[in-house]
Amino acid sequence: MTQSTHQRLVLASNNAGKVREIAQLLAGTGLEVVPQGAFAVPEVEENGLTFVENAILKARAAARHSGCPALADDSGLEVDALKGAPGIRSARYAGPEASDAQNIARLLAALDGVPEAERSARFQCLLVYLRHADDPTPMICQGTWEGRILEAPRGTQGFGYDPVFFVPNQGCSAAELDPAIKNQLSHRGQALRQWRARLAGDSGRP
């Protein structure tokens, strides 16, 4: 990753929780991670049908407006009892401007009466890296974190659906985990570690 250690990278997100989490995960890499807000990158319409399509849309917009390589992720929660919902609409599940609490409330209402054994779910993260806005070969990494949905929120760490996402091997919700442990286990942490490993082995990328 020698060439990357002095690289300025635009992060295609305005989500404060996501920006904070990715900055923590990339600490010590030497990468200068700059949120897209610093470049006044406009919000892109996420009209893709999949996580990866939306991540590419966001990365291209960020790269084009900043002139820097861009990193974008599109992530969300898939609940088996809801046939994969909220999925790519996770951030907007309760409406376009919905808060985390509103999204959680809608999710719990949709699962009302569903027994614990049928509340299996997973977080998905699709991470896309573009060297420039017209990069024809995006680097794509994926992380998946399995768990189940609780009947009520627990914990104050994290963001999004973390308070209702139970992590079986930890015996608590994602919002009850120490941030360092969450970063080791999470879908986003998995995808970012893949990206760092692949970038280190790809001498053709800056």
Image: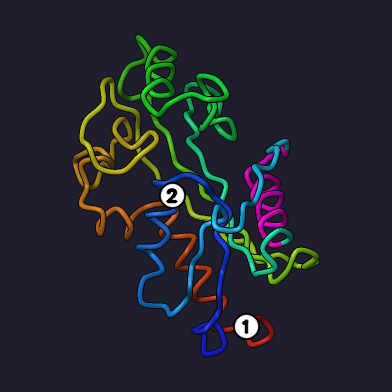
- Looking at the rendered structure, the kind of residue marked 1 is Asp
Quarter occupied by residue 161: top left
Q: Mark 2 points at which residue?
A: 18
With 122 as the anchor, is 163 left or right in this view?
left
- Looking at the rendered structure, the kind of residue marked 2 is Lys
Between the C-alphas of marks 1 and 2, the distance is 26 Å
Is residue 61 within the magenta segment?
yes
State whether residue 25 is above or below residue 173.
below
Residue 130 x, y percent position in the rendering: 68, 66
Q: Residues within 10 Å of mark 2 (few under 14, many from 20)?
A: some
Which comes sooner in the sequence, label 1 or label 2?
2
The residue under the point 70% across, 68% down is 67
Q: Mark 2 and mark 1 in contact (Cβ < 8 Å)?
A: no
Labels in figure, total: 2
The residue under the point 48% across, 35% down is 77
Residue 183 x, y percent position in the rendering: 33, 57
The residue under the point 55% across, 29% down is 84
State whether residue 147 is above or below residue 72.
above
Is residue 153 within the magenta segment?
no
Q: Is mark 2 on a helix, strand or loop?
A: helix
Span of residues in magenta: 48-63
| 178 and 198: which is toward the camera | 178
Residue 202 is labelled as 1
Residue 180 x, y percent position in the rendering: 25, 59
With 156 as the anchor, is 59 left or right in this view?
right
